Amino acid sequence: MASQWRKVKLAFGLNTWVHIPTDFDDSSSSLNSTAARFSITTSPSAVVSPAGDTSGYCPTTPTPSSSCFSLPKSESKSYETCAICLNIMKPGQGYAIFTAECSHSFHFHCIISNVKHGNQTCPVCRAKWKEAPSHSLAFNVPQDMAQINPVTPRYDDWTTRLRRFPSQQVGAGWQSSSLNHVPEPAIFDDDEALDRQNSITHDKNEDDHNIVGTLEMKTYPEVLAVPKLASRDNFGVLIHLKAPPSGRNQNKGGNNAEEPPSDKKSHAAIDLVTVLDVSGSMGGTKLALLKRAMGFVIQNLGPSDRLSVIAFSSTAHRIFPLRLMTDTGRQQALQAVNSLIANGGTNIAEGLRKGAKVFVDRRWKNPVSSIILLSDGKDTYSVSRGPNVETNYQLLVPDSIHRNNSTGLHIPVHAFGFGSDHDAALMHSISEISGGTFSFIEAEDVIQDAFAQCIGGLLSVVVQELQVKVECVHPSLQLSSVKAGSYQTSLTDNSRMASINVGDLYAEEERDFLVTVNVPVDGSSSEMSLLIVRALYRDPITKEMVDLEENSEVKIQRPDNVGTAELVVSIEVDRQRNRLLAAEAMAEARVAAERHDLSAAVSILENCHKALSETVSARAGDSLCLALSVELEEMQVRMRSKRVYEQSGRAYVLSGLSSHSCQRATARGDSTDRRSRLQSYQTPSMVDMVTRSQSTTLGAPQNRRTLDPSKSFPEGADENNNNNN
């Protein structure tokens, strides 16, 4: 028998060995039985059997009793797609293909991670396998492994072992405990230590950060002048902030998909925890797409960034500790993600609790911290449901990651609702309570682009702990309102001072806050000082506090008579009033829709649309105003019936509210309307990362929907949509 297997090795021509476990009967009948199930092929025309026969031993069309893995080297007319990484299994690419006993085929390196961690079911049909390969990492990982797309690694030297699963392990009991394959300590204090001298990801040019600059701040009064003998109630003053650019290279339209993370310029390092739903409903294509998206995230984290992975279904487990994304760390993280299997229920609260625990227990701390949460279902363990039951979502979010907690952690949760069956209200509340964003991924194949947009921002944080302080100058002035969306504001008892707690800003990200005052009659001077605005923030790389108060005094003219030009309302103020008006209408419409009064909800949106069309900025053709109108129209369509609202309307509205309230880009739905241009919150770093995602063409399905960097919504079915119209 040994000589027969030696012939296989010689015929194969690789550093390969095949081992028959000792529990197999070492007889010719056993060998023939084993040979009837496994074969290794080097080309469709040259198939090697354990006996050395090259007469086409492995059947062309696999049968339920045949399993094979091959190294194809010739072209064929059509190619299968690996259901795990979604890449084409094209001959001649230098990697093995495994065909299971259920007839489904996968890349050998993709399926091996699942088998290694105990998965014995087919990712496609969920059939329980009796036999599958396992992998021994007895080779050195190539030095350039990090530069290869993590979902398509290629191994020149590999070792294969054919193993029979014990029959008693195959069953529901094993499946229900599938997340327990990685031992989990009681305290997550095993995070990988940071190199304090390398707390940022950077290249060799240490002067990169010196040219970044500081936060830009501008103020715009509603009008330039108010007559001396006139008063003006609710006089608006806009505070506009823009973060400085980052030091990392932007994609100028080229394909930078292969650029390794170490080649990026400086960014504040991040501790990222991904909390991923692996319940039964995530099986099949959803899980495959999630793994591919996570592969993209892993590939684009730098060597100073750290990642931890939490998987949850009926319970939650940490499958990967907080590790630096070095070459080794990325490879280990990818193996952990590829080991995920889908089964069980949905316990979002437990997954979030364990994700927060990673931050609470860690010994080291990177400058930026965040959680990415993804789920496609409803929490059936922690949420009571019923017609008269009101859920206190505050209780579902760990205190340690509340936005306004006193722990100082400040861990925003960026929640992604996946598909039409997720709990949009829960996911939106989690993001709002923690200070993150809520995105609605309606089209499954947009998940990687949505993740890319999120990490594009997280990897470009240039401002932290930002606070805006507003103080009245004129003795008769008082602040009547501070419009800051979801950001925490405080107002002194005498209404003379206010502060806005903004937090982090991504590179070149903008914020607009509208404060109003009542301007009194005052004939004592031809000029009036209204407000002084200051901005105080921390630079995440230098750790220095920056106090910005240049050109921060807001003044208006107080002439005896005012000309026509001085009465023209500022476009900047008007467009932000429109944004606030639209957001308020969306919130009101949502309340009406939750009361099952969809006609009232649509009416609210229609009235807002009409009001916007009559504003100064709309008449001037302002792009934001036009985009708001398109968004309001889209929401009306998604509220046309209870069924449509339940499937997509609620999530679409909530993701819009999340975006407007925190003025940050989110992924929204699957609109195919080419007029959709609402992506004013998307930063250059986000555009760069989405472009990278869309440039990852290996195995990309045809007619794939994409999240256009210049648009709010993914597109891909426009042609069909136009035909239907």
Image: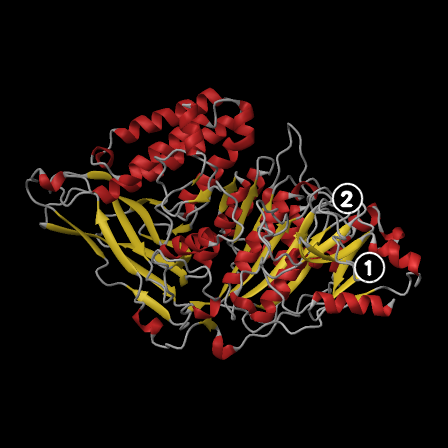
- Residue at image position (47%, 62%) is 258
* Scheme of image coloration: secondary structure
* Mark closer to the chain start, 2 or 1: 2
Task: Please state the horizontal and vertical placement of residue 256, each as a whole percent of the image.
Answer: 42, 60
Can I make out residue 324 in this image? yes
Q: Dot 1: few (<14), some (14–19), or many (≥20) neighbours within 10 Å? A: some
Q: Which mark is residue 63?
A: 2
Q: Which amino acid does label 1 sit on?
A: Arg
Q: Residue 373, labelled with which disc?
A: none
Residue extending furthest bottom? 197
Locate the N terminus and report the quarter of the image it occupies: bottom right
Q: Where is residue 238 in the image (x, y as percent from the top left)?
A: 27, 48
Extreme-top residue of the structure = 599
**What distance separates the C-alpha of mark 2 from that of mark 1?**
19 Å
> In the drawing, does residue 671 fall left or right of residue 388?
left
Residue at image position (25%, 43%) is 573
- Three-letter amino acid code at the position of disc 2: Thr
**Quick one: quadrant of the C terminus?**
top left
In-image side of 34 versus 540 (left or right): right
- The image quarter in which residue 181 lies: bottom right
Q: Where is residue 223 in the image (x, y as percent from the top left)?
A: 17, 43
Residue designated by label 1? 163
